[in-house]
Each structure stands twice: as structure tokens, then as C-alpha cells.
Image (tube, coloured by chain):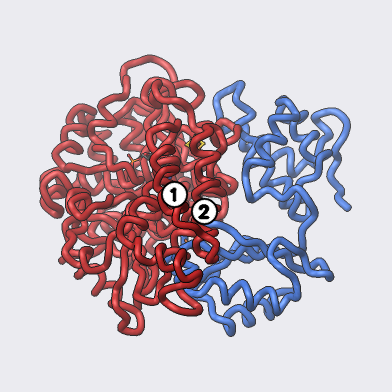
Amino acid sequence: MQLDQICFRTRHLAKPWTMESYRSVGGYEMLEKILKEKTRPEDIIEELKDSALRGRGGAGFPTGLKWSFMPRRLPGAKYIVCNSDEGEPGTCKDRDILRFNPHQVVEGMIIAGYTIGAQSGYNYIRGEFVEPFERFEAAIQEAREAGYLGKNILGSKFSFELYTQPGAGAYICGEETALLESIEGKKGQPRYKPPFPAGYGLFGRPTTVNNTETLASVPVILQYGGEWFHEIGTPNNGGSKIFSVSGHVNQPGNYEVPLGTPFSELLELAGGMKHGNKIKAVIPGGTSTPVIPGEAMMDVAMSYDGISRGGSMLGAGSVIVMDETTCMVKALERIAEFYYEESCGQCTPCREGTGWLYRVVKRIEHGEGTQQDLDRLVDVANNISGNTICALGEAAAMPVISFIKHFRDEFQHHIDHKCCQVGEGAP
Amino acid sequence: MSDLQLTGSKEQLFNADIRQQIDQWVAKYPSGQSQAAVIPALHILQDAHQGWLSDPLMDALAEYLSMPTISVYEVATFYTMFELKPVGKHKISICTNISCMLNGSEQVVEHIESRLGVGLGKTTSDGKFTIKEVECLGACCGAPMMQLDRDYHEHLTAERIDQILDGIS
Ligand SMILES: Cc1cc2nc3c(=O)[nH]c(=O)nc-3n(C[C@H](O)[C@H](O)[C@H](O)COP(=O)(O)O)c2cc1C
Ligand code: SF4
Ligand code: FES
């Protein structure tokens, strides 16, 4: 298995974030080639479709298809926006892409701008990411000095400007329309869709929003070809993917591995289970994705389709590993608290429902739950799903339903015995 | 105590350096969209004002960006990084979300609370530190972690925390 072929392709170098390092792995060659040969945007989109690249921000939408929705010939301003708001618990890959390979995001955004007909781009970086923000700003600076940004880039007819925009602490701003509101200087509250950003996006203009990892994948795909990329992964699941492996493992970290890699291999890369403990459960794609029991997880292949067959979702590739000492009720309590805290409050089912979920799980965890509470939880979760403006509602509901489905006996134990099944001090 | 000018005409607000910083942000957006600079500007003002945003400061920003005062307040209250009350000289944000919790963030909180003698959300009596519990900061593979002012500190242990805090003046 080959590691670090795409977004981390500079990671082995001494100062991987510099223009010099990026060029040494072939960086900016594609941009130069495209501008020189005046590659047709349609051809770039075809290549992306062949690559089977799917959005790395969580929803997994095919990138080539998304780019094809942009009315590129429409006169006036259009935008490419990079989503570096990374905040889903368990996810920490975009931070490392920005710290170690910011130029690849810059090149990806310029190529995206060329392809979708945008004249400017914004990279929205969560406010706490000071170092990644500075690395990205420095990369923009270097790119401008090298003539890759500005008017008539490298003597072509294409002009493009790139800016960084900071967030200020709000998970919901990762939702693409909330993110656009936030760039516009407003509260980050998701918009109703439709209209979709490709029709009405930033400042009311056509906009494409892509995740950091998605955009960073583009230059490499074009350099080596869509088919090459596709073949690294499995059919319909092109390329490699960065998995952030955290929790009870010996070597937590970001591992960029081919899609389709067996979970067991990924776990081995991450140094195996801490203290040699038994694996109990895995959340494979960030806290909003359903939990999978450890044993079942050992048979799962890490791809969109593989994890879906295993009963969950790849999400942002945030693999949270829990061992036998973990109290699942307590784990769910923390997750439910997160969605309660982060609900933007715009729709009643989410605003009220996340509060209910949190309070009821908390009461079960603290030995004050009743038998009806278990059914109530599933009931509340089902009532949020599908009744909200954005997917945060679903994100709050899915963990609850899956935790109770797979670990019902633990919840039952808390209710019957008013204490934890796995003993004091867990997790 | 802040030497920022908070009343008067636009050309006099804050100080020349801050006006220039905010203007650089405004220049990044299409004309007529200066409100887009409000979040970057609030960060700049908070940093220049002992880490928090007062009402007069936000009023002045509304004036400077030609936006309704209420909209500045709405933004400042929506985002958790903005402090609306005085804070300590240094801010410690401890992540207690799932990956950090699995790796002992509760002990991190306990250790910092007992070392500093204050609870979460509070400021030490000498005004040196404010400690906050925060949601996932996107460094889950370095769990447990905290942010001290602008820097991330990962793989925390009691010894590591002591070392870090000993080095702070
Ligand atoms: C509550 C919520 C939070 C999200 N957070 C992020 C995020 O931090 N980063 C991200 O890229 N996408 C996030 N998304 C997904 C975005 O809405 C959007 O689908 C994505 O940025 C599109 O890029 P992609 O197609 O390249 O994946 C979030 C979605 C929701 C509903
Ligand atoms: S689902 Fe929740 S987070 Fe999303 S818009 Fe509604 S209230 Fe806001
Ligand atoms: S869970 Fe603590 S940084 Fe993500």
C-alpha cells in the first residue's frame, strides 16, 4: 500500500509548506500546462469525473459533477470557496494539509477558478487555526510573487485572486451555506436550499464550495490522470483518502491510504489498540456518522461504499476508535452535548430536539433515566431527521439511533442499576 | 484601559494601524460588501483590547463599517471566540470532546483547575489566566489537547501542562 501520494505528497520533505518543496514534487506544473495549452474546462471536468473523486468534506458528492453545475459563461462575479472550517469531532486532516501542503490547495483553487469561471476565491479557515492560516497566507504570497495570482496569469487571459477568511468559533459554519453567510459578515445560519450555491452563493453570485482535501486532490488528479487516481481506490471510490485515526490507538494520526484499505490495516498503521485492549466500537466518519461495533468493523473496507455496507458513512474520514473500557452512554452524552451546543437554533426540531437528546442521555448516564427514556430518545431522534433546514439535525440524530441500536444493553444497565456497566472511571 | 479612539468621525476611530488593518480586509471584498470584514475586524479589535470586546468598541466598529450596530452584536454573540467580558491575560481553551475525552481530557481539566485554583469559565484572581472548555479544535489525533492563546499543545500530560504554564509570564 502506498501512503501519502496525494494531499500529503510533500510531507516527507524538510519544509514541506514552501513553494520550493511543492515545486520539487511537480507542484504548479499542471496550472502552467493548463494556462499554456488553454485546456478546455470541459476536459478538466471530464478528467475529474473519470477520477471518481468525491467530496472529502462529509457528503461525498462527486466533484466533477458539482463543477459542471456552474454557469461558467454567465457574465459577472463567480466564486470558488474552500471549506477549511474543520470542526466535526474526530476530524483533523485539513489542518495538516494547510500546515504541510498549503500550495496544493492554492493550486487546486486556481485551477477550480479557471474551470468554473470564477475570478476570485476565498479559503474560509476556522478561527482557532492560527498556524494553518499563516501558512496559507504565506503560500498565497509566494504564489502571487511567482505570478500564479493576479491579472492575466502567466500571460494568459485568465485573472484570479485568492483570499483567506477567518471564522470565529462555530461548528455550523462548516455547513456550506452557513459558511457563505459567515464570509458575508453574518451569523452562520444555514440558508434554505434551493437555491443552491451554484445558482445563488457568495454575495448572491454563483459559487462552488469544496472541502480543503477535495481541492488539494485536483492538481494531482490532473497531473497523473483521472484513471490513475480512480485505480488507486476502488470503482466509484477514486483515490486515496486521509483518515484521521484518534481515540484508543497507539499511534493516532492522519493516514493517507487508498480508498478500500481494510480497516484492520488502518488500525495496524495507527499502532493497534492502546494497552492491547479489546476494540469495542468505531465511529468511522466523525461523530455525525453511525457507530459500528468493533468486531463488525474489522471486516469493513475503508471506502464510501465499504463503510456504507458496514452500516455507517465515510463522512470526513474521521475514525474514532473506542476500546472495551469505554462507557458508550458517556460517549454518546458527550456527542449529544456537542450538537446541542452547536445547533444554530433556526429550526425548532433541531433547536429543541438536540436539547432533549442531550438531557435524556445525560440523565441515563447519571443513573436517573427511566425505561420510557430509551424509547423517547429514539422517538426524538426520528422526529428531528428530515425536518430541518440543514444536515446538523440528522448529524445529531444518527449517533443516538446507532448507539442505542448496537449498545442497548449498556443503556438498559444504566437504567436498571443506576450505574455504569464498564466500571468506575470509564472511559 | 485602552488607548483606542472609540468616538468621533470615521477617520479618527481606533488608531491608524488598526484602521489600516481593517481597510486591508475590506479591500478583499466586492464594493458595497464591507460588512464581510466584521469577523476579521472583531478579531483585530479583540486582540488590541486585552482580549475582549466592549459595547463601545462594537459600536465604533459598526460606525466604521457602516453597518447596523445590532448586526455587529449579533455576530459577536454568535461566535464563541469573541469574549464579551474582560478575560485574563492568557486564555486556555481545553477541548473535552470525544477524542480528547477518550484520552483523558477530564484529568487535564482537573489538573489545570487545581493548579490555577479556578474552575472552567473563570479567571484567576491575579488576572493572568482564563480557562475555558471548548468543543473539538480539530487536533483530535493529538488528544488530549488545549490551546493557549494562539498555540496548540497536544498529547498533554500533567508534567507537560506544568512545563507549559511554568514558561508563561
Ligand atoms: C453541520 C455541518 C458541518 C459541516 N462541516 C464541514 C466542514 O467543517 N468542512 C467541510 O468541508 N464540509 C463540512 N460540511 C459539508 C459542507 O456543507 C459541504 O458539503 C462541503 O464543504 C462540500 O465540499 P466537498 O463536496 O468537497 O466535500 C458540513 C456540513 C454540515 C451539515
Ligand atoms: S438543522 Fe439545526 S443547525 Fe441546521 S439550520 Fe436547523 S437549527 Fe440550524
Ligand atoms: S476532540 Fe479534542 S481536538 Fe478534536
Residue at (18%, 60%) from the top-left corner? A300
- Type of amino acid at the residue the image marks with label 2: Val
For the question of whether residue B91 can be seen, the reply is yes
Q: Of label 2 and label 1, which has the lower sequence position? A: 2
Question: For mark 1, does the 10 Å Cα neighbourhood hold few (<14), some (14 to 19), or many (20 or more) residues?
Answer: many
In the displayed structure image, the side of residue A16 where residue A352 appears, left or right: right
Q: Residue at x 17, y 47 (%)?
A: A237
Image quarter in which the C terminus of chain A is found? bottom left
Residue at image point 74% right, 38% down: B19
Could you say which quadrant of the image residue A383 lies in? top left
Tell me if mark 2 has few (under 14), some (14-19) or many (20+) residues whose alpha carbon lies within 10 angstroms of its own: many
* Residue A124, above or below B138: above
Check the rendered structure and report the hue given to chain B: blue
The image position of residue B154, as x and y in percent, is 51, 71
Contact between labelled residues 1 and 2, with CB atoms less than 8 Å apart: yes
Residue designated by label 2: A360
Kindly identify which residue carries mark 1. Answer: A377
> Along the line of sight, which residue is nearer the eye, A93 or A71?
A93
Between A363 and A6, the one lying in front of the other is: A363
Q: Residue at x 61, y 37 (%)?
A: B25
In the rendered image, residue A86, in percent from the top left (x then y), is placed at 45, 50
Residue A154 location, quadrant: top left
Q: Is residue A280 left or right of residue B29?
A: left
